[in-house]
Amino acid sequence: MSEDVILKSKENAARRALEFVKEGMIIGVGSGSTVRLFIELLSKEFDGVDLTFVAASYDSELNLIKQGFRLLPLYEVEKIDIAIDGADEVDPKGNLIKGGGAALTREKIIDYFAEKYCIIVDSTKLVSRLFQKHPIPLEVLPESWTFVKNFLETNLRGDAKLREAVRKNGPVITDNGNFILDFHVNPNVEKPPELLEEYLNSIPGVIENGIFARRKPFKIIVGYPNRVEVLDM
């Protein structure tokens, strides 16, 4: 699938999500290219409408500010009416892998505490089973990364790599000041996503992991070049 076709598919998914936005809402937004398109479309369709936002990343914060939206820090809101977010993988049961942009911790806070959350993706993100295309990102304390890496490789027999930055020397640093470990799951390890999500978070030094399975989105909007499909979870 060409980049232009994927971009059109993402835009179609982002546009359909606009129907869930109502005046007066407090809206949580995740991060990534599809969420960026959603913010741009919002600025055109909801110009001057009373909306308040909380964001999962500095990238999304800057985009919201650029479009002139009201932005609040998470600790200043008592509820989030709806969250709109993307995903790296989506399986048929609505389980997700997220964290390719290293914003997984704040994304999970926003998505899990929102009244409901909606995932917007292009069709290339659909998989028959998680962990086939992408590793599981884990946000870890910098002091703990070698211990966590060794624990994962010893106990789950997979391969964990420290995520290296692209345009700076050294590792990726999250918005929270932590490191990212990308864990490639051993296919012989059979754990349901919900249990694996909980297990990974029980490891000392792990802040959060990129499996989103314990709380499902209420809608998954899948964009195609000429249509969208809305999956009810």
Image: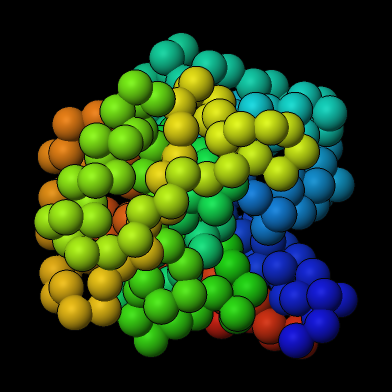
Q: Position of residue 40 (x, y in %)?
A: 80, 47
Q: Which residue is at a point 76% across and 38% down the rendered structure image?
A: 167
Left or right of 176: which side holds 92?
left
The quadrant of the picture occupied by the C terminus is: bottom left
Q: Is residue 92 above or below residue 45?
A: below
Q: Nearer the viewer, residue 27 or 204?
A: 204
Q: Which residue is at a point 79% across and 70% down the rendered structure image?
A: 7
Quarter where residue 8 is shown: bottom right
Q: Nearer the viewer, residue 19 or 27?
A: 27
Q: Is residue 84 above or below residue 203?
A: below
- Residue occupying the far top of the picture: 76
Left or right of 145: which side holds 193?
left
Q: Which residue is at a point 24% across and 46% down the rendered structure image?
A: 150
Q: Nearer the viewer, residue 224 or 178?
A: 178
Residue 29 visible in the shown view: no
Left or right of 17: which side holds 216?
left
Q: Nearer the viewer, residue 153 or 26?
A: 153
Residue 152 visible in the shown view: yes
Quarter where residue 228 is shown: bottom right
Q: Which residue is at a point 26% across and 72% down the rendered structure image?
A: 186
Q: Position of residue 209 (x, y in %)?
A: 33, 46
